[in-house]
Amino acid sequence: MSFFFVDLRSMNRSATHVVTEFILLGFPGSWKIQIFLFSLFLMIYVLTLLGNGAIIYAVRYNPQLHNPMYFLLGNFAFLEIWYVSSTVPNMLANILSKTKAISFSGCFLQFYFFFSLGTTECLFLAVMAYDRYLAICHPLQYPAIMTGRFCSKLVSFCWLIGFLGYPIPIFFISQLPFCGPNIIDHFLCDMDPLMALSCAPAPITECIFYTQSSLVLFFTSMYILRSYTLLITAVFQVPFAAGRRKAFSTCGSHLVVVSLFYGTVMVMYVSPTYGVPTLLQKILTLIYSVVTPLFNPLIYSLRNKDMKLALRNILFGMRISQNS
């Protein structure tokens, strides 16, 4: 750490924050392309809010969904709303903006919330895998273990760890000297573009940040993989085909979400991105930050009979109230 602090002390304090704003290039193209992208991302954002909001409403007001699995799913949907809101509103405003500028503090706030919410999502996926493992592999002990109080503790743990893990490293990154240029060839403030704009190297801070991110991804993904390995082994021991189909149907949606999210995130933050085309990096970031929150309510609602019934009851109740 001494190397890092010596570098900062040797800098001229008056030049530390010459850059007061960053320029997010986003997705280049003609005005027609920008309008198309704005319409597309706006539609995705609205559908994501509606889909995840419907899950929250169904879980909260339908007594049949008052159990640990749907409690976790409702909180996961709440997380997805905040996760997509950490990037998409600013991206929409940036598409229509002529300057495409984001303030220095706004950039690092987005950076913090984006990574904190992403870490929280990793932890939520691991907790949901634990819930499915208990429900299928230990059904007799499940009600005694997954109580409402224990579920609340798990949810609180995910939020606390997600938001307490990044303030210090991101604060140190924000204290690096940014003397110019200030152009970020991305649609959000991410680690690699920001470090590329710093006027002084900070290898220790960069190493700490990527090590922390890699450990979160590694341990949560390994735990999920272990849980589902044990789960699938237990499912194959079920003597009836109908029972196996029901168990796979229950967990299939979770596996789809996990594969989509972890596959793209690991490409970005575990494997080296040097030499990877910038457009490909943007597309990969779009998949796990924008597309996945859209797919989650579709996957969970279309593959779950109880959730489909609850959503159907909500729509039916709304029509009755409108007609009356």
Image (cartoon, rainbow, N blue to C red):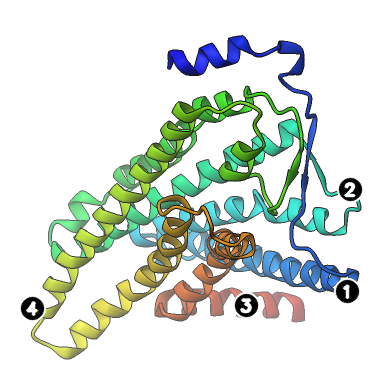
The dot on residue 12 is none
Residue 111 located left or right of residue 205:
right
- C-alpha gap between disc 1 and disc 2: 17 Å
Mark found first going from the N terminus, 2 or 4: 2
Is any part of residue 26 visible from this angle?
Answer: yes
The dot on residue 315 is 3
The dot on residue 237 is 4
Q: Position of residue 255 (x, y in %)?
A: 35, 70
- Element class at badge 2: loop
Mark found first going from the N terminus, 3 or 4: 4
- Element class at badge 4: loop
The residue to which callout 1 is attached is 32
Residue count near mark 4 (Cα–Cα under 10 Å), binned few <14, some 14–19, many ≥20: few
Circle 3/circle 4 CB separation < 8 Å: no
Q: What residue type is labelled 4?
A: Gln
Q: Residue furthest front?
A: 275
Q: Residue furthest bottom?
A: 241
Q: Which amino acid does label 3 sit on?
A: Leu
Q: In which quarter of the image is residue 157?
A: top left
Please name the residue shown 78% across and 29% down the image: 19
The residue to which callout 2 is attached is 99
Mark found first going from the N terminus, 1 or 2: 1
Residue 144 located left or right of residue 282:
left
Residue 239 located left or right of residue 126:
left
